Image (cartoon, rainbow, N blue to C red):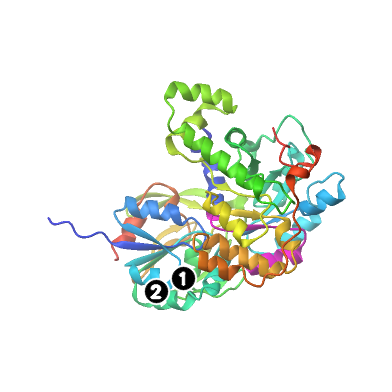
Amino acid sequence: MQDTPKKLVGVLALQGDFEAHQKALEAAGADTLQVRTAEDLGRVDGLVIPGGESTTMLKLLGYTNLLEPLRSYAATKPVFGTCAGAILLATEVLHPSQHSLEAIDMTVERNGYGRQIDSRVATIPFQGGELEAVFIRAPIIRRVGPSVTVLAEYQGTPVLIEAGHHLAATFHPELTGDSRVHALFLSKL
Amino acid sequence: MILNDEKFRLKVGLAEMLKGGVIMDVVNAEQAVIAERAGACAVMALERVPSDIRKEGGVARMSPVSKVREIMAAVSIPVMAKARIGHFTEARILEAMGVDYIDESEVLTPADEEHHIAKRDFKVPFVCGARNLGEALRRIAEGAAMIRTKGEAGSGNIVEAVRHIRTIIREMRHLTILGKEELVHESKILGAPLDLVEWVAENGRLPVPNFSAGGIATPADAALVMQLGAEAVFVGSGIFKSEDPEARAKAIVKAATYYKDPLKLLEASEDLGMAMPGLDISKLPEEELMQTRGW
C-alpha cells in the first residue's frame, strides 16, 4: 500500500492549549500548523479550535479580523472545537450570551457545571468502549439541532457531537494522551 | 508522584487553558469588566495593586471577601485571588468562596517566614512565584499547579522577570545534560525533590505551565518574556496605573498572541499614552524588595 501524504491540520493559536492539540494530532498521524492569520488558514485541510477562554479568543478574532475568514472556512472545511472551541462553533451561547461562528446548530451554556472546583475527570462510553474525559470549567450542550449526531454523553447531556464534517467536545481529549478523538477528526478530512 | 494524581491534573488543566493569555490584576468589579472586555483570560483579585502597596506600606492582606465576590459576579472568565505566603486560612476562605485559582503571593505581607501553604490538600489550584528552579520545584512539590516568575512587582521594570525566567530556563537546560548520579547531587543543591528533578532532566521543561509576572508594563515587555519562554503573562500595576488602561490592556493581550511578529507588536504599541512610572530596582533598599519573600 502506498503512503498517502499526511494531512496538514491547523490549530487556532490565539490563546489556549493549542500545543497540546498539536501533540495529539501528530500522535494521530497528521502534520500541524499554528494558525494566527487568514493566510495560515488558507493552507490547512482542517482546523482545531482549542480549549482556552472563549471570550479572549473572540476578542482576538475581532482585533485581527479573523472572524469572517473563519466563518467562511467552517462553511466548507472540517473544524473540531474542544471546550472554548465548542462554544465558538455553536449557533447559540448562553450564560452569558455571546456571539460565535455559528457553524453547528446547538445551544451551549458556558461554565455549565460551575467554577474550577467543579471541574472533573469522568469515564464516558465511546465507540463501544470507554474514554477518559477531562472537564475544566466546561460548558454544557443544552440543545442540538436535527443535523447533529451525539457520539458521547455524560450525565444525560451530549459531550461529543458531530455535525457534517465538524466535531465538538465539551471536554479535553488533548489532555489525556489518548488520541482516538483526534483520529476520528482526521478521518473526516 | 504528585504529577499523576487526578486532582493535580485538573489543576494543571486550567493552567493549560490560560496559556498565551494575559491575567490582569484588578481591585474591583469595574476594573474586572474592563479587563474582560479587553480580552484578559483571567483576572486576579487583590486589595491594592503592588505599586500602591509599595507606596502606602503597611500589611498587605487578602482582598476583602465582598470585593472578591463582586469581581466573581461581574465576569465570566476565571477569577484568581491572592493569599499571603503561608496563610492557609486565607486560602481556605478563598476556596470556600469558589475562586478558580489562588496566588500564594510575595506581593502580600508573608504570614509565615518558614513555611508555604501545603497546597496538595486543597481542591482549588495554586500558582506560586519563583526566582529559580529550586524554588519552582519546591512550590510544585507543595502542590502548586502553575509557576510564575516573581520579577519585582509594582516596579514597572522588567529586569527581574527577565532574570528569573532566564535563570529557570538555564537551570532546566543544565539538568538535561547530567547523568543519573549527578541528578541526586543536583537535587541537594537545588533543595528540590529528586523525582521532580529527574522529570525536568528528562523533559527539559517544568511539569506545570511556566508563566511570567513582575514588572510587565508594555506590550513589548509581554512579548519579551514570552520569547524567553514564558507561556502566559500576569500584569499587575502595569495596566490600571497607566494613562489609558483599556487601550493598554488590549495591546498587551495582542502582544501575548503575536509575540513573535514585530509588525503586529508595532501595531499594538501605537497610541497607548503613558506607561506606569518605573523604578530602578538596583536603587531600592533590600527590605523593600518583594521577590526575596518566599522560602
Relative to B91, does residue B272 appear above or below in the rendering? below
Residue B147 in the image: above or below residue B183: below
Q: Earlier in the sequence, mark 2 or mark 1?
A: 2
Question: Magenta residues?
Answer: B17-40
Tell me if residue B25 is in the magenta stretch: yes
Label placed on residue A11: none
Image-quadrant location for residue B130: top right
Secondary element type, mark 1: helix
Q: In the image, residue B223 lies at what x, y percent?
A: 56, 57
> In screen coordinates, is B100 left or right of B109?
left
Q: Is residue B107 visible?
A: yes
Residue at coordinates 38% horizontally, 66% vertically from top-left?
A47
* Crowd rating for badge 2 (residues with CA inside 10 Å; few <14, some 14–19, many 20+): many
Q: Amino acid at mark 2?
A: Ala
On screen, residue B284 above or below A94: above
Residue lying at 72% horizontally and 51% vertically, measured from the top left: B97
- Residue A152 or residue B172, whichever sits in front: B172
Depth check: B167 or A129 in front? Answer: B167
Return the residue nearer the eye: B174 or B144. Answer: B174
Label 2 sits on residue: A74
**Is disc 2 in contact with disc 1, using a CB cutoff of under 8 Å?**
yes
Question: What percent of the width, then of the height, locates residue B189?
Answer: 57, 25
Residue furthest to the left? A1
Q: Does the magenta portion include B95?
A: no
Quarter of the figure with the C terminus of chain A: bottom left
**Is residue A174 shown left or right of residue B89?**
left
- The picture places residue A89, in percent across and down from the top left corner, at 46, 70
The disc placed on residue A89 is: 1
At label 1, the amino acid type is Leu
Q: Position of residue B20 (x, y in %)?
A: 54, 57
Query: Are dots 2 and 1 on a single chain?
Result: yes
